[in-house]
Each structure stands twice: as C-alpha cells, then as structure tokens.
Image (spheres, grey):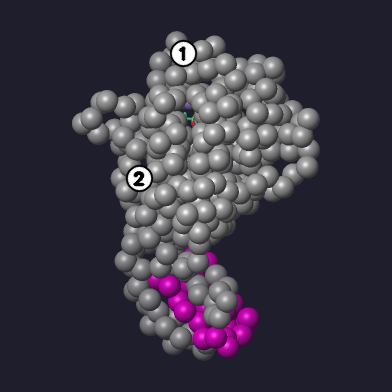
Amino acid sequence: MLVVMDAHATAGQIEQVCRAIAELGYTPHAMPGPTRTAIGITGNRGPIVDADRIGRLPGVRELIRVTAPYKLVSREFHEADTVVHVGDAEIGGAAVPVIAGPCTVESREQLLAVARAVRQAGAVALRGGAYKPRTSPYAFQGLGLEGLRLLAEARDLTGLPVVTEIMDAETLPAALECADMLQVGARNMQNYPLLKAVGRSGRPVLLKRGFAATVKDLLLAAEYILSEGNPNVVLCERGIRTFDDSARFTLDLGAVPIVKQLSHLPVIVDPSHASGRAARVVPLARAAIAAGADGLIVEVHHAPELAACDGEQALTPPTFRMLMGQVERIAAAIDRSLAVATGSALS
Ligand code: PEP
Ligand code: MN
C-alpha cells in the first residue's frame, strides 16, 4: 500500500500518518518526491484491514494498492530511477560505469597491475574477490583477510572504489573496513540472513541474480535489503541456467528492460561469468549496453593464463581498453555516455 499525501501536506500530517501506520503494526517509509510525499507501507502481517483509518487522516490524497509482491524496490513505490553512489562513482544515472578487475585477488603484484590497467582504461571501480564461492571445495578459495587488505591498498593507490564479495555475515565487519560496495554473489542471492545483514550495514550492495532465480526472486531478494533500510542496491544480470550448455550460462538480456520497468533500482550486466570465454565477453558487453544496462562488471587479468580462477573468461588489458572504446560509442548512440573516474589518485 502506498499513501499519497497532498502537495501541501505539512510535516506534522506526514508524521501523523507514519505514526498511525506504526500503530497498526506496519512499517512506514516516507518518500519525499519533487511535488508531494508518498508513504510506503510494508509489513508481514497480511493486508491492512483498517486502511480507511489512514485514508481519512488530514493531508492524505489517496491510497494506492501495490500489487507487486516486492514493494520498496518497485516502480509503483518509487517512480524515479535510483542512483547508487559508490565512492566517487555513480550507478544508475545517464553515464554508464564499468567496474573491472580480477576474478580473485591472488597477490599484491597481480592486483596492483590489474587495478592500474583498468583505471587507465576508464573503469570507475575495482572488483576482486577475497572470499570466493567455488563450486568445488578443492578450488582456490581466495586470500580472505589478506585479500581485503590488498584491495584497500589498491584503492589507495588508484583512487578506485572497491567492490568485493561477502559470503557470510561474520565477515561483514572486516569487509566493511575495505569495501565500498558489498557483492552478494549468485550463489547467495537467497541467503536471507546475509541479505538482512548487508541491508543493516547501509553500504552499497551489488546483488547478483541467482542462476536459477526468476526476475521476481531477484527483486524479492533486493526487497530484503531495502526493507532493512538500505536503498543502495544495484542488481546484476550474470546469466542463468537453461537447457543450453554451449556457454557457461545463458545471459538473459531480456531481463534488463523487464527489471527497469518493474524497479527503480539500477541493473548492470556481468558478461564474464555469463559467457565463460574471453572471446564472447566483448559482444555480450556491447549488447548489454545497447539493451539499456546501467553498467558492466567485467573480469580483467594481466596474465589470464596464470589466473587462479576464471582465467578463460578474463579480458587482457588491451582487449578491455578496446571494449571501453566500443562501450563509449554504443552509449552515445542511445543518448548515454561512458562514466569517467573523477578521483585524481593514479600511480
Ligand atoms: C564473481 O563475480 O566473482 C562471482 C563469483 O560471480 P557470480 O556470483 O555471478 O557467480
Ligand atoms: Mn569469476
């Protein structure tokens, strides 16, 4: 349910409505807009029986039933596009940002080489996993705390904000010391305690679509984060499992305009995990921008043949630079632009 207030409703009237909602056992979310304030109502006690009581309060213009199961993430609740700030970078505006870096933090030398290369090519944020959700327990699991420390060093050297994956709530305090954006990976998209924990943290979250998740599942997972008071969520399409096994996953680009229609949250695309092969990453990345994605997250490695994880899908720095030029031209063709890093540090 959404309570739309009169354009001239006073702060006291808005507060009175919020109080009445809370008294009924629901949570009010006041959302000031350019012309009027709307107050979203969420809760898990079923439909409000006594909605009329709210509708009669002074300053209330109308009550709108929100039919979607997700509320705070829906366009019905919040019409304007949300822009998420990650360090100096913006995701969800007209300019298209590219996040890039290695799959995994392997060593100081590797991370700094890749970080410098992607910074020089125009990436606005650095990705890199310190904790890796590997399908096999015998695959490299990441450097853990040492990886987080190296990411912080790379940020200091390049000025790029850091995006890194978190797999459990226990690691959150350490990750918060280094991460400008917390990634919740495909395998954890429905790890509800983790979603609540990153929601409470308030830190921007990159929420990747689970590979057996519908768009509705993805939006409901995001709802967990927003319902904890954290509106800074960026969704990521990264490929789903289908009957076709010719690529690592099937990139569902059709989901991009669907998510944009249903939700105000930014949606970016990960062409690396979707395709699994470097040669296929570039065409998928181009198509993602053309389809209206609000950005890309791409794996880059200075020596892919030596990578500890996902080397087959890593772009080399020269290929990544070429891709950035193409993204810039495709963005311009659809009246967008390529976001540029504004931080000055680069060594
Ligand atoms: C990753 O980005 O490193 C990753 C593991 O991706 P996903 O969760 O999409 O598989
Ligand atoms: Mn990877």
Height in image: 254 above or below 36? above
Q: Which kind of residue does numbered mark 1 sit on?
A: Ala
Residue 174 badge: none
Q: Position of residue 12 (x, y in %)?
A: 62, 82
Q: Which residue is mark 2?
A: 253
In the picture provided, is 254 more to the left or to the right than 72? left
Which image quadrant: the C terminus? top right
Q: Nearer the viewer, mark 1 or mark 2?
A: 2
The residue tagged with tag 2: helix, strand or loop? loop
Tell me the crowding category of disc 2: few under 14, some 14 to 19, or many 20 or more residues within 10 angstroms, Cα based.
many
* Residue drawn at point x = 34 percent, y = 55 percent: 258
Q: Which residues are magenta?
A: 1-30
User: From this viewpoint, is residue 219 visible?
Assistant: no
* Residue drawn at point x = 44 percent, y = 19 percent: 312
How far is mark 1 from mark 2, CA to CA?
30 Å
| Location of residue 131 (image quadrant) | top right
User: From this viewpoint, is residue 305 visible?
Assistant: yes
| Location of residue 37 (image quadrant) | bottom right
Q: Position of residue 291 (x, y in %)?
A: 39, 50
Q: Which kind of residue does numbered mark 2 sit on?
A: Leu
In the picture provided, is 58 more to the left or to the right than 85? left
The residue tagged with tag 1: helix, strand or loop? loop
| Location of residue 288 (image quadrant) | top left
Q: Nearer the viewer, residue 110 or 206?
A: 110
**Magenta stretch contains residue 323:** no
